[in-house]
Image (cartoon, grey):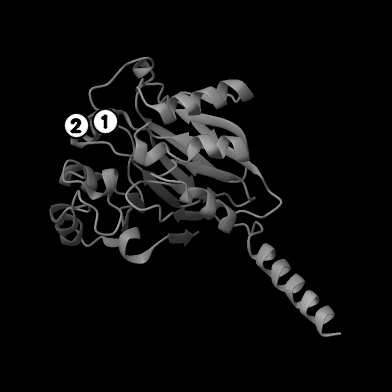
């Protein structure tokens, strides 16, 4: 009898856990704690999954198991902002463990073993590839739209001096809310985005390059005019991210700061 009760209790707990991960009609944004790197998971109101970057290790896989239903092995959209190791490491494995509807990447070249493996799996599985175009929006069909801002399509096939500068930048739009996701762009890219006249105003910004002092210029942050800033960085990292200059700038502008190095995964719902 005790065994039966224990089995029933475990089954109920598992069912409750799975119920909590079912679509609830809201947009969920998770800035995942992957250490010194970037990885984000967006879950749309109808339960579609958008993964942005894969962090510096395999911890993304554990996070996907935490936030995605056990029976759901489908990622509707995977976005690689740029192929640096701290953004791509888990993505080849993700492509082997999950079915992926489409992939958005800049198309810029980089000599990187993980990137080569990533592209190999995409080709082998015949996954459609999308390239950034500021005239294109990606509508998820349930109120969530991704507005692509950067880079321009002509970076395809280019071997950049600094891959960070060509990071894919998207603005997630849902109802009255806007969330700006900036990859690792630098101040020069920020200035080009503003000069092009793109609408960057957002309630929330994912701060570029883990809070590096080479990003998040005052003019760019002022144009975004966010209420909150999210920073993905590793505790005690050797780069000094987030930099005190960036933190001071955000605080001076009255922007609430949330950080994975102090909070672990940061989760928001709208």
Up the image or down, 115 lies above or below 54; here it is above
What residue does disc 2 label?
188
Q: Of residues 52 and 234, which is closer to you in this image?
A: 234
Q: Residue 39 in the image: x percent, y percent?
A: 42, 46
Q: Residue 33 in the image: x percent, y percent?
A: 40, 56
Q: Residue 89 in the image: x percent, y percent?
A: 43, 39
Q: Residue 165's mark? A: 1
Q: Of residues 226 and 117, which is closer to you in this image?
A: 117
Up the image or down, 119 lies above or below 234; here it is above
What is the tally of numbered marks visible in this picture? Answer: 2
Q: Which quadrant holds residue 149? A: top left
| Secondary element at tag 1 | helix
Q: Taking 117 as reference, is 183 left or right?
A: left
Q: Residue at x 50, y 43 (%)?
A: 51
Q: Are marks 1 and 2 in contact (CB under 8 Å)?
A: yes
Looking at this rendering, what residue extends furthest in the right direction?
A: 1
Dot 2, crowdedness within 10 Å: few (<14), some or many (≥20)? few
Q: Of residues 127 and 11, which is closer to you in this image?
A: 11
Q: Which circle's residue, 1 or 2, is located before the other in the chain?
A: 1
Q: Residue 216 in the image: x percent, y percent?
A: 21, 45
- Residue 258 in sight in this render: no
| Secondary element at tag 2 | helix
Q: Taking 118 as reference, is 140 left or right?
A: right
Q: Which quadrant holds residue 76? A: top right
Q: Residue at x 32, y 33 (%)?
A: 198
Q: Where is the N terminus found, in terms of image quarters?
A: bottom right
Q: Residue at x 35, y 48 (%)?
A: 202
């Amino acid at each position: 009898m005790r065994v039966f009760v224990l089995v029933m209790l475990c089954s109920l707990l598992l069912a409750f856990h799975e119920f909590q991960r079912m679509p609830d009609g809201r947009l969920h944004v998770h800035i995942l704690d992957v250490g010194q790197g970037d990885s984000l998971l967006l879950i749309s109101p109808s339960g579609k999954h958008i993964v942005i970057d894969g962090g510096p290790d395999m911890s993304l896989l554990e996070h996907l198991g935490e936030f995605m239903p056990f029976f759901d092995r489908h990622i509707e959209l995977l976005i690689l902002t740029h192929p640096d190791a701290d953004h791509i490491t888990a993505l080849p494995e993700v492509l082997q463990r999950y079915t992926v509807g489409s992939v958005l990447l800049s198309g810029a070249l980089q000599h990187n073993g993980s990137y080569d493996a990533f592209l190999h799996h995409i080709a082998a599985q015949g996954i459609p590839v999308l390239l950034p175009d500021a005239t294109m929006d990606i509508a998820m069909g349930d109120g969530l739209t991704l507005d692509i801002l950067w880079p321009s399509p002509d970076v395809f096939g280019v071997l950049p001096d600094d891959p960070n500068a060509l990071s894919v930048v998207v603005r997630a739009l849902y109802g009255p809310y806007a969330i700006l996701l900036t990859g690792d762009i630098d101040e020069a890219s920020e200035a080009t985005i503003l000069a092009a006249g793109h609408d960057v105003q957002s309630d929330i910004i994912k701060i570029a390059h883990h809070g590096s002092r080479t990003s998040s210029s005052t003019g760019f942050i002022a144009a975004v005019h966010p209420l909150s800033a999210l920073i993905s960085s590793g505790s005690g990292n050797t780069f000094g991210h987030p930099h005190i200059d960036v933190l001071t700038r955000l605080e001076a502008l009255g922007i609430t700061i949330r950080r994975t190095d102090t909070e672990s995964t940061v989760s928001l719902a709208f």
